[in-house]
Image (spheres, grey):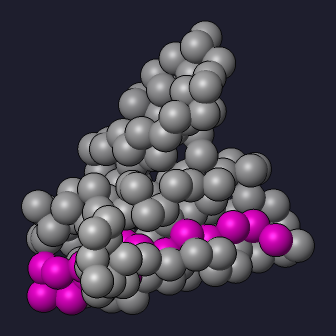
Amino acid sequence: MIDLPSLAPGLAALAEADPEREVCGFVVADSRGAQTVLPVRNVAGETAAAYEIDPAAHLALARSLRDDGGRIVAVYHSHIDGPARLSAADLEGAVDGDLPVLPGTDQVVIGMESGKTLEVRVLRWKGSEFRPLAAWTPATARRVAPGAP
């Protein structure tokens, strides 16, 4: 499972640094399980309303992870002015027939409004659909920050 408390602030920062387009990429785990966020170029024709991960980058990553014993934990993307949920277009790209395109890989959506992150949500394939698994908000992070009252 994605280490949401550790990775969500970085995911939010990536989305907020480029608020005019949907950012996208992967969360990967190395052979020891350590997780890293890997941004990938969005090659969609209309990057303000959709995302498409650069296929060449995806292939290169898959080869590298295979050789190094790592794996893709999640695919992430942002919605520049929308909720942290999978849209119809997102589902079309994430599901093939009745199965996920990347089995065992979570989906992470960064919901934003006016250039600010509202929520980072993790969705996991369960049965026949992606279902919410965990969520993070900037307000929650401030309340549970180390040393916070």
Task: From this view, report whether residue 88 is shown above or below residue 147.
Answer: below
- Observer-nearest residue: 7 or 79? 7
The percent position of residue 17, horizontal first and vertical second, equals 11, 61
Which residue shows up at 55% across the image and 70% down it?
122
Q: Give the range drawn in magenta.
A: 110-126
Say left or right for 10 vs 91. left
Using the rendered view, name the quadrant where residue 88 is placed: bottom right
Q: Quadrant of the C terminus?
A: bottom left
- Observer-nearest residue: 82 or 10? 10
* In the image, residue 6 lies in the stretch drawn in magenta: no
Using the rendered view, name the quadrant where residue 55 is placed: top left
Which residue shows up at 37% across the image and 77% down it?
144
Task: From this view, report whether residue 100 is shown above or below residue 87.
Answer: above
What secondary structure predominates along the stretch shown in magenta? strand
The percent position of residue 22, horizontal first and vertical second, equals 27, 66
Number of numbered markers: 0
Q: In which quarter of the image is the N terminus?
A: bottom right
The percent position of residue 68, horizontal first and vertical second, equals 58, 13
Task: From this view, report whether residue 38 is shown above or below residue 121.
Answer: above
- Observer-nearest residue: 89 or 70? 70
- Observer-nearest residue: 129 or 30? 30
Which residue shows up at 70% across the image and 79% down it?
131
**Is residue 93 visible to the viewer in this orientation of the structure?**
no
Which residue shows up at 48% across the image and 62% down it?
4
